[in-house]
Image (cartoon, rainbow, N blue to C red):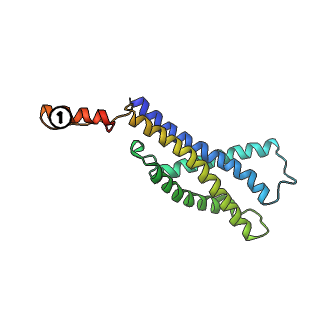
Amino acid sequence: MLLLRRLQYFKLLTADFGAALLAWIGFFLLRKYLLHELDNARFTEAVVIGLAGASLMVATFWVLLYALLGLYRDIFRKSRLSEIIRLARVSVVGVVVIFFALLLDDGVSSYRLYYKTVSAYFLLHFVFTVLLHTWAVSSIQHLVRGGRIFFPSLLIGSNALALNTFRELRRTGQH
């Protein structure tokens, strides 16, 4: 049971890491298009290695940000809707941090391109993260509802009342 619980944490971390990684790679390519750098862009080995390193660092940043803001606490009692709302808030904060840390020094011809790139990155990151994070949370909820992951409980009452309560919880799946 402990191994199964730890595996769920790993699943959630991997989903978030993968979403951040895919979003940054997609953003790298989209940014080349938005900034009109695609015409003379060559994907040399150095560019690919730089992209891989940056993607790993950005994905690590996102997982650390999620951990610092508590998205990995009590993962067995999560609501998908509340997670989506929390992800939207955290994504705004993270995109602003990444904008000031990594994107502000880009040479752009107009400040409107900053708005486009930041909006594009937010949308890419948010969509990928919502899809993968919601999938992970849904699979965890399925394990809890199926009884494979459970919470130790103490029923207090007389023998017959406790037994009836136990049977009712098992029958309705509310255990």
Image-quadrant location for residue 16: top right
Q: Residue at image x 44%, y 51%?
A: 70
Answer left or right for 145 relative to 118.
Answer: left
Q: Secondary structure at mark 1?
A: helix
Rendering coords of residue 146 (x, y %): 39, 33
Query: Taking 109 as reference, is 72 above or below it?
Result: above
Q: Nearer the viewer, residue 122 or 52?
A: 122
Q: Nearer the viewer, residue 120 or 61?
A: 120
- The answer to whether residue 152 is visible is no
Quadrant containing the N terminus is top left
Answer left or right for 58 relative to 74.
Answer: right
Q: Residue at image x 47%, y 52%?
A: 81
Q: Residue at image x 48%, y 55%?
A: 86
Rendering coords of residue 132 (x, y %): 56, 44
Image-quadrant location for residue 123: bottom right
Query: Taking 17 as reference, is 110 above or below it?
Result: below
Give the residue number, with chain letter if any, for mark 1.
162
> Exactly how many numbered labels are in the figure?
1
Rendering coords of residue 158 (x, y %): 12, 35
Count neighbours of disc 1 (C-alpha within 10 A) and say few if under 14, some if 14 to 19, many if 20 or more. some
Q: Nearer the viewer, residue 16 or 146?
A: 146
Tag 1: amino acid: Ala
- The answer to whether residue 6 is visible is yes
Quadrant containing the C terminus is top left
Answer left or right for 173 relative to 75.
Answer: left
Q: Residue at image x 77%, y 59%?
A: 34
Q: Residue most toward the bottom? A: 111
Rendering coords of residue 54 (x, y %): 68, 48
Answer left or right for 134 relative to 30.
Answer: left
